[in-house]
Image (cartoon, rainbow, N blue to C red):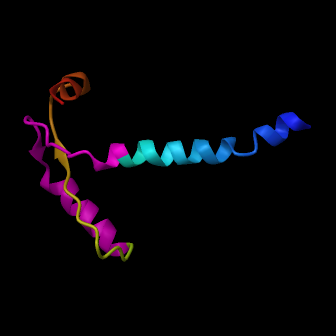
């Protein structure tokens, strides 16, 4: 029974660690891939879908590239 009493705070510590790691990941600056080009048709479609869903503060832009995913990941 004492084993379970000692581990009472373990889930709380895990959740705090998860939030800490997520905040670091989201706080980093996002850079556009140099070979990416704006694709107007999917950009327009995503904006129309956001309006249809009554999402007023959403602004999306779709970029595409012919480079492989591996090359895109190496650029960052």
Residue 55, image x, y percentages = 35, 73
Residue 50 percent coordinates (x, y)? 32, 68
Residue 12 position, x and y percent, is 64, 48
The magenta stretch spans residue 46? yes
Residue 36 image offset from top left, x and y in percent: 11, 39
Q: Nearer the viewer, residue 34 or 48?
A: 34
- Is 34 left, or right, of 27 in this rendering? left
Q: Which of these two is toward me, 76 or 53?
A: 76
Q: Is residue 32 above or below residue 60?
A: above
Q: How many marks?
A: 0
Residue at 13%, 55% (x, y): give it. Answer: 40
The answer to which image quadrant residue 34 occupies is top left
Say whether residue 26 is left or right of residue 71: right
Q: What span is colored magenta in the figure?
A: 24-52
Tell me the residue at 33%/48% (across/down): 26
Instruction: From the viewer's perspective, tell me whether residue 15 is left or right of residue 23.
Output: right
Q: Residue at x 15, y 31 (%)?
A: 66
Q: Quadrant of the N terminus?
A: top right
Which is more toward the observer, 30 or 37? 30
In the rendered image, residue 56 lying in the magenta stretch gets the answer no
Q: Quadrant of residue 64?
A: top left
Name the outermost residue toward the right.
Answer: 1
Instruction: Find residue 4 and report its image quarter.
Output: top right
Asked whether 14 or 71 is in front, the reply is 14
Q: Residue at x 22, y 54 (%)?
A: 42
Q: Quadrant of the C terminus?
A: top left
């Amino acid at each position: 029974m004492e084993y379970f009493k000692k581990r009472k705070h373990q889930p709380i510590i895990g959740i705090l660690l998860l939030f800490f790691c997520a905040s670091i990941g989201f706080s980093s600056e996002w850079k556009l891939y140099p070979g990416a080009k704006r694709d107007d048709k999917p950009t327009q479609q995503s904006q129309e879908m956001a309006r249809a869903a009554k999402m007023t503060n959403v602004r999306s832009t779709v970029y595409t590239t012919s480079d492989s995913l591996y090359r895109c990941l190496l650029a960052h």
